[in-house]
Amino acid sequence: MDDGRPLQQAARLACLCVVIHAPEDLRLDEREVEPLGPGQVRVRVGYGGICGSDLHYFHQGGFGTVRIKRPMTLGHEVAGTVAEVAGDVTRVRPGDRVAVNPSRPCGRCRYCLEGLPNQCLDMRFYGSAMRDPHVEGAFRTLLTCDAVQCETVAAHVPLQHAALAEPFSVGLHGVARAGSLLGKKVLVSGCGPIGALAVAAARVHGAAEITAVDLTDETLAVARAMGAHRTINVAADPGWVARFSGDKGTFDVMLECSGNERALRAGLEVMRPRGIVVQLGLGGDVSLPQNVVVAKELSVCGSFRFHAEFALAVRLINEGRVDMRPMITGAFPVRQAREAFELAGDRKRAMKMLLAFDEAAG
Amino acid sequence: MDDGRPLQQAARLACLCVVIHAPEDLRLDEREVEPLGPGQVRVRVGYGGICGSDLHYFHQGGFGTVRIKRPMTLGHEVAGTVAEVAGDVTRVRPGDRVAVNPSRPCGRCRYCLEGLPNQCLDMRFYGSAMRDPHVEGAFRTLLTCDAVQCETVAAHVPLQHAALAEPFSVGLHGVARAGSLLGKKVLVSGCGPIGALAVAAARVHGAAEITAVDLTDETLAVARAMGAHRTINVAADPGWVARFSGDKGTFDVMLECSGNERALRAGLEVMRPRGIVVQLGLGGDVSLPQNVVVAKELSVCGSFRFHAEFALAVRLINEGRVDMRPMITGAFPVRQAREAFELAGDRKRAMKMLLAFDEAAG
Amino acid sequence: MDDGRPLQQAARLACLCVVIHAPEDLRLDEREVEPLGPGQVRVRVGYGGICGSDLHYFHQGGFGTVRIKRPMTLGHEVAGTVAEVAGDVTRVRPGDRVAVNPSRPCGRCRYCLEGLPNQCLDMRFYGSAMRDPHVEGAFRTLLTCDAVQCETVAAHVPLQHAALAEPFSVGLHGVARAGSLLGKKVLVSGCGPIGALAVAAARVHGAAEITAVDLTDETLAVARAMGAHRTINVAADPGWVARFSGDKGTFDVMLECSGNERALRAGLEVMRPRGIVVQLGLGGDVSLPQNVVVAKELSVCGSFRFHAEFALAVRLINEGRVDMRPMITGAFPVRQAREAFELAGDRKRAMKMLLAFDEAAG
Amino acid sequence: MDDGRPLQQAARLACLCVVIHAPEDLRLDEREVEPLGPGQVRVRVGYGGICGSDLHYFHQGGFGTVRIKRPMTLGHEVAGTVAEVAGDVTRVRPGDRVAVNPSRPCGRCRYCLEGLPNQCLDMRFYGSAMRDPHVEGAFRTLLTCDAVQCETVAAHVPLQHAALAEPFSVGLHGVARAGSLLGKKVLVSGCGPIGALAVAAARVHGAAEITAVDLTDETLAVARAMGAHRTINVAADPGWVARFSGDKGTFDVMLECSGNERALRAGLEVMRPRGIVVQLGLGGDVSLPQNVVVAKELSVCGSFRFHAEFALAVRLINEGRVDMRPMITGAFPVRQAREAFELAGDRKRAMKMLLAFDEAAG
């Protein structure tokens, strides 16, 4: 904190943050708000969605080789209200309700200049310990960000829905990786938040038929509400693979959102020749039957985060082309963040859990 | 056999075949030549290349779930001279030297009608135990086949070279799966016959730079002769991955011809974002770091056999756009088939071993 | 006619056909129904939509170099009820309500085997004078066709809507040619039946934003009802090009359905670099500013008829994913075919005019 | 000129430039050399190729709406020797022989950030009057440019050949727009410098068969030397279209380099369904048979300049994968620039004319 500042101003710049200190050690810390630079805005965060990576930091302090080395504010799925804008900002105005894109590519590296900003060599993505110093997250009552990160939310859209623009963007990017879905039979495996939103993304983009598979009926019900034509609980119906693997297979596109090896292997059996398997979400090692990939000439394609899809997500939500209501389990006040995190990990009870920041800031 | 035929004609229709009876039980059997139907031709086989799948049948009686259930003539890489043609054939004439496409799709199933004949639901591919009754192979002194299977070999091209059109087609199909190589850095892993011919296919199609990796210097020397700009013996140079993995990786395209898990995993490390990994050849289960595939948005694409590429392979050989000489280790008379098969499996001594059928038929 | 047949059966096989004899000479002729061969069905036609090519035959006796040389039954947009099926047919049963695909590729030529059946070298398309003898059309009370041409219509779907499956297929094929519309701004120019259905096709497949342009408010109102986000009457608003041509242009995809040179030229001005212009419908010569195509690296792509899109069209109509009501101007009894044809040509009064065949057959 | 500078330094910074003042008014003017900024180098120009656009400025003062408004140095195809480098430059060193990329995109606009730098909204391309103030060209004895514009030329490559890297890049970009040429039959129409180099680009990238057409035997001879399998003088052989238009056409890809309407129209007749016509070079209005584009579902794609292809061009020249000797008509001393420009416009006598700058600078 800049000691020279008058107390009053310093007080105005403090805010509450949801900070992970160590596995299971989640705290509500008061931190200083970053000063407002050129092209920047200050957002009073309304709601923030808890993501799988937030849960990994909460429970294990990270995932794979990514581990927190010092306390870090979590969160990257937020929407709120613009409180203040720098003098040069015209994109938004105070009072505008916005969803905040947590992705901040450098705009100068070779991948940015190739049109692949999600592969930026100097990416700063909210609430990520991939680099050190870590990039602080957006679970905070006041957030200073670039105006270009803000997408305006329509008046009739609840901020809770707008907070889902980020995971919806992930689903949209997965669909973008698959190419046109015109006439295509799509299999979505794993119906957590990303999978359910991938269903919605595929539905909006014209998939002829969407089949969603998962191990729990509760998530499948959400997948159906988000647009799946058919859902299969593969735990209860182990014969499903045989039904869809005739004549070399059925599905043109698979959106693999479970990260589960068995789900992926089953999917390869039911894909038709030249089918495209899009893998979303970061998993570990998986054992694949390479002869199936070869003999059916499948393509297994990674999908990582998103870029232009964020603005598209907000647009589709604004226009009512996707209904986020089935996705939202509930919103807990930020002071009950721990309870919200606990519940968010229970797939039978929770799809998307939100934190409500407003009252804390009040 | 058509009993009505005079004995003399029946005698004329016998030929020598290289038949696998059981693992390690390879015999030179006399078998009847199939009668000449409409649209068909009879080819006096000159040379036949021994392929990896032939070796699998020879040593283990098959691979994976594919096993010989009864004696089967091996071989699917042959070239010879047209001896006789049915009355309706205009494509070739007796005396023409031809390479024979071992791939016979049905032309009526859904995949044939989608332009994917290599995915035919009723494929009959020479020398394959994938279906039962097995499809007999082409290692025989006289072969009856459809005229459309024959591609004319130019006068100046040795039949030994023409016999390599089939494995070259496999490499070409792999390159076709990768899309345009203009400006692309290509990694070829595994420099057996398919890998070395994949190098040639990539070179002909304009790869900016081809790096070939293998474990033996002998195969790498062939890869270099076939067009690799750079070769790396990864056994001798384990630091190669580190050199090529900076800034998320170097290579745009990988043609994976080893079927080896370690080779594939190393390749994923050195691929750049959005790179395309084409997997050729049928392997078993492989363990993949799915997080690398996702984070770099790689595409792992299977490549299975070929179709239109066969005619292209013959054309490129005819025009001298690929020189097959470095590929050919030698040709053994068919009566020494066992010795040829033994040698063909030794990667330090043999690249492509051929069987010479001419004298046997003489 | 097979003379050996008893008179009674022959009488049963007669039906009424809408036949063009010469320009403006449209007659309702009694013609014999084709016998029912293997794999075939007989359909009692319910409704038939009048297409632009029908109007060309009606008014000018053809278009371009395509001219009727003898009387020809018109029509290729029909739906009806299966009356009878050959013994080997399992796809449909008597009583099933079906839309009939007028496209009958040979399944054997090079383009059919490349997966391009709409480019078939031996195509027989209903009601077309492109070949001689002409291919008779489907504006008839009884139609004998192949079972594979029939797509089952859901119980709740009016046959009038099902009759629009064919022009909707044309729109869907245009969208398929454009590739994925995810995040794309789409311009549809010309809002006759094909244009309005192209709007619907683009909307179903997720276009981020659809702008429809035409010269008449009536057709634009239909385009809006079919899913356009924005409509522009370019006759009333000549400044529209300037508004959308900044920074090299706005639209990612153009579906050009007017066949009008001025519309195409205006479209090229408002397309952004690397934009895709899909040209639907057969026009004559057009003068293009090739320097614009080059400098912005636009792609102008033809779209001709459809194939797999027909089944998709019926599916989308069956599932209520497109609402055909705004498309239908009305249905005239077939005995008033001339009046229907006259009205169908008036773009201010008619979008899609249908002929009702049921009562005539009664 | 900065008056404050000492005379000696100013003298050192003067150089000779080939400047167009008005149509047919070409002068050799002494101009000041731009100061050396960070990241920049000074190149002693060796050779410069005269391009079609240079000829347009020379004869007509421009083309289309692009007209010189004040004197402008011409030229954008140059190679030379590095004379001096800024302190921060590591890419090249004094004495290095380099080809200079005349394309300088901004790196910040939306198209640059989409990976389309050749569509940059703020492009500065040497010797172009597209913007005002015009961008000065590179026909000068001393050129100050960014180090990133320089590609090192191999020791054994004559600078005359390296000067052709720019037009070769144009051909390579056209081939890149066409996608993979594996197995493709390519038609190149117009065999001026761009066409002949497009032949070379297609040959290097594996076109199965290249047919070049033109009106003059002299250019066709060069096309053959650059890799065309077949050449046709369409003035002498008007029946060529009929020979190649059977079964809907022959060619998969057309590289249209003539800008001539008749050539384009003939090409559309001989293209096969789904063929890709790449239009290179800026022409005026052309009248197209839109019904052919539609019925055969052709794609007519613009190709504008190049970007990454420049480095590739130099690489291919360095490695001897393309031989530039047949391209070069001769090199005139810069003091005979007018004579060189006159000759360059005579297609029967000149393919690529070069200006030699070295002695002038001596």
Image (cartoon, coloured by chain):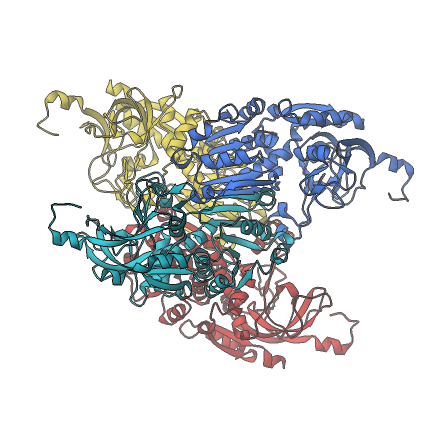
Chain colours: A cyan, B blue, C red, D yellow
Q: Is residue B82 left or right of residue D81?
A: right
| Above-or-below relation of C63 to D194 | below
Name the residue at the left extreme: D4
Kindly indicate the quadrant of the structure image that contains residue B163: top right
Name the residue at the front extreme: A25
Report the residue at 34% width, 65% height from top. Answer: C230
**The C terminus of chain B is located in which quarter?**
top right
Q: Is residue A275 left or right of residue B208?
A: right
| Above-or-below relation of D156 to A157 | above
Instruction: Say how many tags the image has.
Output: 0
Q: Is residue C301 visible?
A: yes
Q: Could you tell me residue C205's position as x and y percent?
A: 45, 60
Q: Could you tell me residue D114's position as x and y percent?
A: 35, 45
| Above-or-below relation of D289 to B70 | below
| Above-or-below relation of A240 to C218 | above
Q: Could you tell me residue A15's position as x and y percent?
A: 23, 54
Q: Nearer the viewer, residue A236 or A316?
A: A236
**The N terminus of chain B is located in which quarter?**
top right
Q: Is residue B84 visible?
A: no
Report the residue at 60% width, 48% height from top. Answer: B116
Q: Nearer the viewer, residue C58 or D10?
A: D10
Q: Could you tell me residue D293's position as x and y percent?
A: 48, 52
